[in-house]
Amino acid sequence: MAAGVEAKGFEHMGLDPRLLRAVSELGWSVPTAIQARAIPLAMEGRDLLARARTGSGKTGAYGLPLLHKVLTSKQAAPVVSQAVRALVLVPSAELARQVGQSLRGLAAFCGRQLRLAELCGHSDLAEQRPVLMEQPDIVVGTPGRVLAHVAGQALALRPSLEVLVLDEADLLLSFGFGDDIKALLCHLPKIYQALLVSATLNPELEALQELVLHNPVHVLPPEPRLPGRWQLQQLQLRCSSEEDKFLLLAALLKLRLLRGRALLFVAGLSRAFRLKLFLEQFGIAACALNPQLPARSRCHVIAQFNRGLYDYIVATDEEGTAEPPRHRPRKEGTARKGGSDRGQSPQCPQDPEFSASRGIDFQNVAAVVNFDVPGSVECYIHRVGRTARGDKPGTALTLALPHELERLRRIEDALAGEDGQSLLQPYEFRMEEIETLRYRCRDAMRAVTKQAVREARLRELRQELLNSEKLKVYFEDNPRDLQALRHDRPLHPAIVQPHLGHVPEYLVPPGLRGVANPNPKKRKSLRGAGARRGGSKPRGSGNPLQSFRYSRRGNRRGTPGDTS
Ligand code: AMP
């Protein structure tokens, strides 16, 4: 049954004024489709089964009624007593942190009325106990971590729990949390409101739905799997060689043809480091999101990106493949030592709860560049879903080598509109225009040797060891080991060639001279020198990706949709 609820503004949903104030401060002027449908129903106390992709505003859809309920319940209690009233289960530590942050944002004007605890997987169970002793109103965490605390009697959910949320329910199952959720249900009171949110509603979810939900309303907003053309521009460019891909990306970033912050997706971790080091040769700072590092470090990278320290993150899909790992149920009695969130697959050295392409909110991502064509449609959707979030516009550009075209075609076919037309428009770009940069590109590629990539990875691991909280005590007892690590054999990273970072005007494609801004420090003088004299327009706020389809006479660069 689809919810037949008329769309209402936030102010007509009966939400606590403090929450409305936060919504307004966040700049959420109108509810998204999922919010418009789910919030009024959840406010009535109904159980919900909602289909919502990340980026659709789903956290607000369950977060606002959840916060409202907790506030109301605390106010109604004759004596205000602290107790855990809401539990949000998420599939990863990163998501726990992200959801916690979103809820805090929405509760910004509730002062001390609301206490929230995120149970992120990287901390020891013992470290989290004091937080739980304070009986936070809302707990956010992975099922494994929450169950470990319940088993250790640090967390009691009965009889106080009023709302249970299962966020990214399809991932909760595919990440092997099914048994933990079942075990947790035994520790809940008989009556509570349950909200289950999932990007996909597949038959595998049905058993879970039956266990958790009571007479739920199905909220299935008619939303496409990706935002529409007006919000998300999808482009593709065929490259004839590997070198062309690197050259093109260097030109897009160095000449600032691609504006704003971007996620660059590649096929594997070595390649991520290679691309990062390559960009460094051009003085372009990027960080590689390494799935082999612990959640805390990855969260730190994402936080740095969100704070604007980097404009570019090079990311991989989990395990370098397309799909999230499917069912890895944990056997009874194989409890995780130290309450780590999930069992680790022996074939998978990286933390399997991690995925850059699912759920995590990289904020203000203007563009996603698929430097390598993703392995599947699902993977494409999850990658591209990192941009055009909420009501913001975004661009996705996919670069394809001849051997990747078949994969690209499959993605295009699966996403084609009802008219059978591909949604991935060709990106009009004349490679010959950037031939001037090819020698520099080759120099940069040559500098990034296999050894340089290896050393960069080693350097990161060494840094990780030195920063490790867990090893701190060990190093205190074994200072020699710490010294040895510090003075381990010197590494030989890629030598950055400073001249590559500076692109003189004569190397800028003629049509872009005075418009492209390869050396940002000189931005003022370029502008001052009359960069607009030639008729070029200041950069607008719409399409972040500029095309080479422009009329030379006026240096006008058009968007790929232009016919000029
Ligand atoms: P989510 O799907 O919950 O991860 O939300 C994705 C992004 O959309 C977040 O950055 C939210 O801040 C933003 N967002 C959620 N609801 C709205 C809204 N009604 N209007 C504008 N942005 C929103």
Image (tube, rainbow, N blue to C red):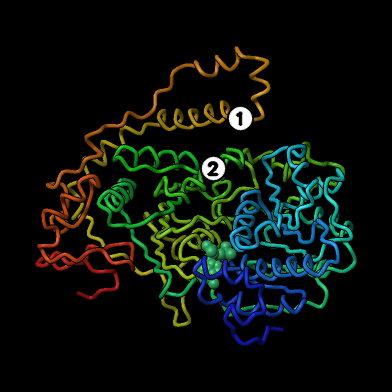
Q: Is mark 2 within 8 Å of ligand 1?
A: no
Q: Quadrant of residue 359?
A: bottom right
x and y, in percent, of residue 249 in the image? 32, 50
Name the quarter where the C terminus is drawn: bottom left
Name the quarter where the N terminus is drawn: bottom right
x and y, in percent, of residue 390 in the image? 51, 68
Q: Residues within 10 Å of mark 1 (few under 14, many from 20)?
A: some
Q: Report whether residue 390 is seen.
A: no
230 with respect to 358 (left or right): left
**Judging from the image, what secondary structure is the residue with disc 2 in?**
helix
x and y, in percent, of residue 563 in the image? 23, 75
187 with respect to 539 (left or right): right
Q: Residue at x 62, y 69 (%)?
A: 19
Quarter of the picture for ligand 1?
bottom right
Q: Report whether residue 272 is seen.
A: yes
Which label number is shown at residue 468?
1
Q: Could you tell me how many numbered marks the image carries?
A: 2
Q: Earlier in the sequence, mark 1 or mark 2?
A: 2
Q: CA distance from mark 1 to mark 2?
A: 13 Å
Which label number is shown at residue 226?
none
x and y, in percent, of residue 224 in the image? 54, 75
**Judging from the image, what secondary structure is the residue with disc 1 in?**
loop
Q: Residue at x 40, y 43 (%)?
A: 286
146 with respect to 240 (left or right): right
Q: Which residue is mark 2?
A: 300
Verify CB contact (< 8 Å) between mark 1 and mark 2. no
